[in-house]
Image: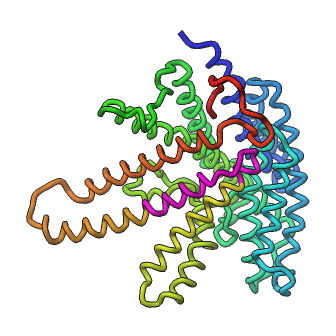
Amino acid sequence: MIAEEALEAYRFFVLPGVLGIVVFRLAPFVAWMILTRDLSAATKAILLGLVSVPAAATFASDRDTIAVFFAAAAALAYFGLLGTCVYLLPERVEQGEVSPGAVFALCASLSLVLPGIAARGSARVLLVVFGFEFLLSAYSYVVEVAGSSSRRPTLGDCLFFLIVNPTLVYTSCGERVSEPRLDARGLARAGLGIGALLVHFGLMLLPVMYPQIGEAPHWAEVADVHSYSRMMLLSFLGMVLVYAVHSGVASVQIGVLRMMGYRIPERYRFPLLATSPFDWWRRWNTYVGGWFKTYVFTPCALYLGRRLPRSRNLAKALAVLLTFGVSGVLHELAQFSMGSRVSGVIAELFICHGALLLAWVAGTRAAGVLQRTVFRQARLVPMGLTVMAFSWLIFLHANVAIMRPLVDALGGEDQRAQPAPASHDHPAR
């Protein structure tokens, strides 16, 4: 029998929250469709009808989520004004009046911290998520345009990249390949994204219908092979759950942009098919990964390479740890802007992920040496399959290690403003 409390939690919290994220991510596309002159009235009506489906579902799931629509409209106005200011910054950077570091600090304050202070509830989470990507896009735009000798983009091009285009690196933001039209591939891709979101909703219903599924054992409770395998299986299912909603939203964005006439890079390259943790990070969220590779890893690797000319591998290893550390600090700032206390857990665990990645690289090199020397004549299991299985086991352990402390550290909607409940039966986030 389905618990009534679980169904209410799903209907009034999980479903509206995920649908709200979809609506918030599609709001810039709706604004562009309304304002652009490149689309016919019939095409506008069809595309607006397509993107209105999640909006109608959000309103039907919980009428209180009407605040999401007002928050989306306010966010478009605010970030549009902020984007206009960003448009003026490359010239200031070229003239030496403002440094790129100052640009990053200013954008972080205005796109992350200020929305976190001004907004409340689910609207604050949505604003901070959007502001996080706006911060990365704005920095990339300013740095790349300031260092380019080509024609300066128009204000419309700037706002399109910052608010509509989901890519985060200006030099890899895709290209316009056709006029806006109803493209069969674009429609199919958007439909695939909606299907992935339906998979997410279906997986979210499993703990509601079968509560025992959601009761994952803690590390301290693992006493035998059964509890261990159950914990790892639930960790993998959690990864699938997160991947379904992330890739679903990305596919809808890619499909709608395709119908706008733009072809952009893939955001998720089937990460569940990765053969190693290193391959996973190449496939998972390539927009954010590409930004950190371009603006954190590469400059750090070049600088440390000049400082440590006799130890290039050490320089790259330090650059990897610095990249994961900076990513963790930015995620920590985003969580703080959402209302969670600063615990340092996120930054520490990102650094742990970087350390695991380096350990894997060292391990595979050692395994390659063993394969060529000790096991060269032995007819055993191929070393590649062994490394792949071991890599997935390491990565699952890392994700379990991340999710458990995050639940403890980030539990509750607003720990800075709300006191802890007296009862010990409060739900974990």
- Say whether residue 417 is visible: yes
Whether residue 341 appears in magenta in the rendering, the answer is yes
Residue 252 against residue 110 in the figure, above or below: above
Q: Residue 267 lies in what quarter of the image?
A: bottom right
Measuring 63% from the left and 25% from the top, which residue is drawn there? 424
Quadrant of the frame with the C terminus:
top right
Looking at the image, residue 74 sits to the left or right of residue 427; the answer is right
Give the mark count: 0
Numbered range of the magenta stretch: 334-356
Looking at the image, residue 128 sits to the left or right of residue 207; the answer is right
Q: Position of residue 247 (x, y in %)?
A: 58, 46
Residue 424 against residue 22 in the figure, above or below: above
Q: Position of residue 147 (x, y in %)?
A: 74, 83
- Say whether residue 40 is visible: no
Measuring 72% from the left and 70% from the top, which residue is drawn there? 140
- Frontmost residue, 334 versus 342: 342
